Amino acid sequence: MATKIQTLSVRSVAFSQDGHIPKRYSCEGENINPPLEIRNVPEETQTLALIVEDPDAPRGAAEKIVLEKLVYGGPCPPSGTHRYFFKIYALDIELDLQAEADKDTLEQAMHGHVIAQGELMGKYHKSET
């Protein structure tokens, strides 16, 4: 019997759901990760994993993963407005992945261990130069 995956509440003081991600959190600014507030994290959580996806980017440049100490790279669309999905996963295990792990490797490691998930979507449009 499959375990029901709980819902995490994900918010940011930097931008609202479907809102504009400030320049500070992009490649044009400080390129730092936006503050995320995650609520309803189950007690049995061992690891939180974050995948940032840009479905509007060309394939291969659209995904970044953040695990504990890996580096964040902010929105940097080549043109137009792109959507960035910050997907948070609560896992019932600790992950042992290399810094160069890609999204597929992370998803394989997470398979069967996701106990809760949530997401926040923001948009970014690169300044015209």
Image (cartoon, rainbow, N blue to C red):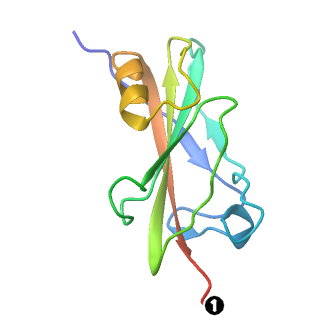
Where residue 42 appears, as percent x and y from the top left, is 56, 20
Count the marks: how many? 1
- Residue 117 vertical placement versus 10 (above, below): above
Q: Nearer the viewer, residue 94 or 116?
A: 94
- Residue extending farthest left: 1
Q: Nearer the viewer, residue 37 or 66?
A: 66
Asked where in the image residue 129 lies, by quadrant, the reply is: bottom right
- Residue extending farthest bottom: 129
**Image quadrant occupied by the N terminus:** top left
- Residue 97 vertical placement versus 87 (above, below): above
- Report the residue marked by disc 1: 129
Tell me what residue is drawn at x 60 percent, y 63 percent.
Answer: 16
- Tell me which amino acid carries mark 1: Thr
- Label 1, residues with CA under 10 Å away: few <14, some 14-19, many ≥20: few
- Residue 122 vertical placement versus 38 (above, below): below
Where residue 50 appears, as percent x and y from the top left, is 54, 38
Where residue 54 appears, as percent x and y from the top left, is 43, 58
Tell me what residue is drawn at x 65 percent, y 47 percent.
Answer: 72
**Lateral position of residue 112 relative to residue 1, left or right:** right
Tell me what residue is drawn at x 60 percent, y 30 percent.
Answer: 67
Callout 1 secondary element: loop
- Residue extending farthest front: 100
**Lateral position of residue 127 relative to residue 83, left or right:** right
Tell me what residue is drawn at x 44 percent, y 21 percent.
Answer: 115
Where residue 70 appears, as percent x and y from the top left, is 65, 35
Asked where in the image residue 48 lies, by quadrant, the reply is: top right
- Residue 35 vertical placement versus 23 (above, below): above
